[in-house]
Image: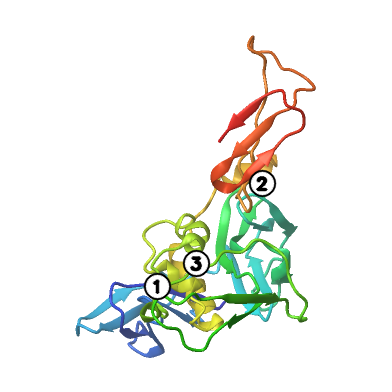
């Protein structure tokens, strides 16, 4: 069975190789982004393996790897254009493959038993059918035991092209600058929506924030531990395939379980507070005596974000 080992180190440049108990080299590896890296090889049950590493500070060390086992379950995920190929199998017993995003379960079906090259279950999931951000795949036994799990990140496909036009080629000091923006989809048709504009000094045009709203909401707040330069994963000046590769490494080394998955799987509860993809307001209107009331119209104002809602002028709330 193919083993995938992801690792993270404090050294930016680390190289090494995996050797067996006889000292025979199996495969080389190195760090890729932010001290993270990955190595894949076919371990033999009963054999012992060691990782020999050398860092940019010339520190040579050797680490014994856990002994390989054919028991349990396996999940392997590969991205294929705009889809994800998920391969899984369980060595024995009954297990299910569950795909979820922390709030919703997208897929839950039994998996095949047997060697990974014979009895594996392979499914293809279109990225457009998944929520943007972190998604989770896990293998769960019939008793609710988690046999394996894997996080993967879904990027939102860029569907808007922006064209900016200025009223002058050269501006003098304190000249008025007029800019017109045209936004179109991939077919060339105009798009509508809510957009924001920011203006910054030209000396900072290549500046990348370490943290922004995207990186915080979709990565930093969802993973355990400190994320090094989370803004990198949303920096459009970096090719998307490089960011996808780095994000996949991050999912493997700092991924964690969101909820009590066995309870979620066995009881199918209603998620009270799921992931927030849009802002919403909800509540309950009662009388001064604490009783529920029917037919009560409510007026809501949120001046800072330009929100207003009303039916009939009976009551009001300022946010």
Looking at the rendered image, the disc whose residue lies closer to the viewer, 3 or 2, is 3
Quadrant containing the N terminus in the rendered view:
bottom right
Cα–Cα span, label 3 and label 2:
22 Å
Mark 3 burial class by Cα count in 10 Å: few <14, some 14-19, many 20+ = many
Cα–Cα span, label 1 and label 3:
11 Å
Q: Residue at x 67, y 42 (%)?
A: 266
Q: Which residue is mark 2?
A: 265
List x then y, in percent, for residue 249: 47, 73
Compared with 213, 266 (above or below) is above
| Image position of 307 (left or right of 13) | right
Tell which circle, 1 or 3, labels the residue nearer the N-terminal end: 1
Of residues 231 and 114, the one drawn nearer to the viewer in this rendering: 231
Q: Which residue is mark 1?
A: 7
Secondary element at tag 2: helix
Q: Residue at x 38, y 69 (%)?
A: 229
Q: Quadrant of residue 292?
A: top right
Q: Residue at x 55, y 78 (%)?
A: 2
Compared with 213, 199 (above or below) is below
List x then y, in percent, for residue 110: 74, 59
Cα–Cα span, label 1 and label 2:
30 Å
Compared with 221, 57 (above or below) is below
Q: Quadrant of residue 294?
A: top right
Mark 2 burial class by Cα count in 10 Å: few <14, some 14-19, many 20+ = some
Tell which circle, 1 or 2, labels the residue nearer the N-terminal end: 1
Q: How many marks?
A: 3
| Image position of 11 (left or right of 93) | left
List x then y, in percent, for residue 19: 36, 85
Q: Which residue is mark 3?
A: 251
Query: From this viewpoint, is residue 270 visible?
Result: no
Q: Residue furthest top?
A: 289
Q: Mark number for residue 79?
A: none
Q: Residue at x 61, y 59 (%)?
A: 138
């Amino acid at each position: 069975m193919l083993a995938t080992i992801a690792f993270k180190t404090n050294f930016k440049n680390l190289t090494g190789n995996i050797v067996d108990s006889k000292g025979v080299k199996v495969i080389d590896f190195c760090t890729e982004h932010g001290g993270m890296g990955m190595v894949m090889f076919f371990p033999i049950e009963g054999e012992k393996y060691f990782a020999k590493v050398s860092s940019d500070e010339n520190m040579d060390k050797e680490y014994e790897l856990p002994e390989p086992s054919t028991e349990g379950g396996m999940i392997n995920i590969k991205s294929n254009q705009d889809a994800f190929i998920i391969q899984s199998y369980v060595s024995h017993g009954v297990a299910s493959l569950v795909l979820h995003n922390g709030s919703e379960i997208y897929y839950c079906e039994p998996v095949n038993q047997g060697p990974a090259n014979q009895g594996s279950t392979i499914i293809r999931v279109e990225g457009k059918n998944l929520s943007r951000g972190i998604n989770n795949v896990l293998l769960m036994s019939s008793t609710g035991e988690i046999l394996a799990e894997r996080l993967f990140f879904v990027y939102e496909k860029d569907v808007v092209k922006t064209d900016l036009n200025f009223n002058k080629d050269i501006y003098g000091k304190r000249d008025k600058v007029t800019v017109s923006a045209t936004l179109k989809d991939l077919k060339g048709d105009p798009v509508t929506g809510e957009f924001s504009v920011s203006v910054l000094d030209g000396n900072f045009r290549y500046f990348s924030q370490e943290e922004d709203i995207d990186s915080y909401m979709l990565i930093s707040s969802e993973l355990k531990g400190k994320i090094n330069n989370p803004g990198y994963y949303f920096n459009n000046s970096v090719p998307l395939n490089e960011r996808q590769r780095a994000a996949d490494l991050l999912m493997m080394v700092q991924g964690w379980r969101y909820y009590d998955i066995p309870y979620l799987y066995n009881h199918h509860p209603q998620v009270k507070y799921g992931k927030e993809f849009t802002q919403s307001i909800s509540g309950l209107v009662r009388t001064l005596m604490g009783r529920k009331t029917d037919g009560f119209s409510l007026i809501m104002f949120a001046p800072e974000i330009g929100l207003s809602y009303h039916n009939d002028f009976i009551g009001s709330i300022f946010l």
